[in-house]
Amino acid sequence: MSSMRRRRNTSLNCGRIGGAGVEALLAGTGREIQGRHSAGVFAVCSAHELVISALLQFGKRHGEVVLVEATCNQVNQYGGYTGMTPADFAGRVEGLCSEEGFSREKLILGGDHLGPNPWKKEPAAAAMAKAKDLVRDYVRAGFTKIHLDASMHLDDDGDPNTPLDPLVIAERTAELCRAAEQGYEERLRRFPEAQAPVYVIGTEVPIPGGAIADDGEVTVTAPEDLHVTVRVTREAFARRGLGGAWERVVAVVVQPGVEFGDHFIKEYSRSQAQALSRALEDYPGLVFEGHSTDYQQAEALRQMVEDGVVILKVGPELTFAMREALFLLEHMEREIPALARAELSNLQQVMEGLMVADPTYWAPYYKGDEAGLRFARKYSLSDRIRYYWAHPQAEAAVNRLLDNLNSVSIPLSLLSQYMPRQYHKVRAGQLSLEAEALVKGRIAEVLQKYSLAVCPQD
């Protein structure tokens, strides 16, 4: 069997991935060793409560460990675009665990792209000071999977079009790790049984925020770049006396050749990723983490895991699925005779108004004439609309939609028209005919695809 088709020793069970450090990632989750399989773990990177609740329900139903991640832009010491600090986010997710009856012992919290990205327009000294506070706060709040990302140019780093020196990235990554270790020491004083954080290093192309170009051009990480990243980061850790922390570095973020933009999906190609996959053999204790894996087909995700991309990140595809379901429900809301005289949600109109009034989160990404921009604001695979769901007007419109539909009996004929897969599940008694359940059922379809990729059924 070729190295590309082999089954890597990356798993001890579904939800458990190999290597001493990676095992620590899922320590205490109650999983038992049951032979060796080619399996991994998927991380849900979303701050939306409908997505997180759907994940917790899915995990409870299937007895799975779940990994929920927040990014530096979503959640930071200043609130991020969600208005939540790391402690706020951890508390909210734990509260949802209680609401859904999901065991807190099977929840892992992760921090994604933790570093100076939110402050990249500031001088390095100021940006890094804030980044270290950010990482420290995440670990103090109980996040145990920490992606350290110092790959971006800061204000005084010179030409932003020139790649940042890997030595500079490594030094900054080590500084962030030291701050994380300090946060862990502080947490230990409050919680003596607290789990030590595990680390992910490296970054993918493009930086957080998603692809801007819609041409599908993606460059797979070169093996030599992987070797440089591991070597210089390990040396930077050693210079700061972080040898123990290095033993808890579990993964390297790479670009395996997947991406998505407004209207394109770059499919995974094993042949293009072959050299990168083979390079991982030099690092028995490490695996790859893949970002922007959203919208990949199920078989492609499965192949990625087999080829060493053991940690799969998904985020926009989940809120895209949620948006699909909410818009479909609004179509039904308008058609149901019993709601003819009700105050309707006008959800799509509300979301369009919010995005036009504040183009901050979509204008740098969407290109084209007004008709094209209007289409992208609704239907782009980049899903920049996800930044607007937390707005009070958006929340009010969603609540109005759900309340309206819950006040009537949704006709099965209408459900079949707009949500045929959910229709069949309702008929089979697998899904409740309630508005929120229909939304979560749509989200669960994406979760199921990832679950089968990281934990194939024998």
Image (cartoon, rainbow, N blue to C red):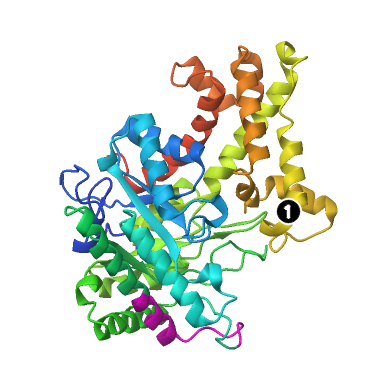
Q: Which residue is depicted at the point 42% across and 54% down?
A: 86
- Residue at position x 48%, y 82% in the image: 125
The three-letter amino acid code for the residue at tag 1 is Asp
Question: Is label 1 in a helix, a strand or a loop?
Answer: loop
The span shown in magenta is: 159-175
Q: Quadrant of residue 239?
A: bottom left
Q: Position of residue 397 (x, y in %)?
A: 67, 32
Q: Nearer the viewer, residue 67 or 221?
A: 67
Image position of 17 with respect to 320: above or below? below
Which residue is disc 1 drawn over? 358
Q: In the rendered view, would you say 200 is above or below 350?
A: below
Residue 174 part of the magenta segment: yes
Q: Can residue 374 be seen at all in this image of the molecule?
A: yes
Residue at 61%, 68% in the rendered image = 217
Binning the other alpha carbons within 10 Å of mark 1 as few (below 14), some (14 to 19) or many (20 upward) gives few
Q: Is residue 185 left or right of residue 264?
A: left
Q: Position of residue 24 (x, y in %)?
A: 21, 57
Looking at the picture, tell me which residue is in the foreground, 126 or 374: 126
Residue projecting furthest to the right: 370
Tell whether position 276 is magenta: no
Is 46 in front, or is 438? Answer: 46
Percent x, y for residue 266?
Answer: 57, 59
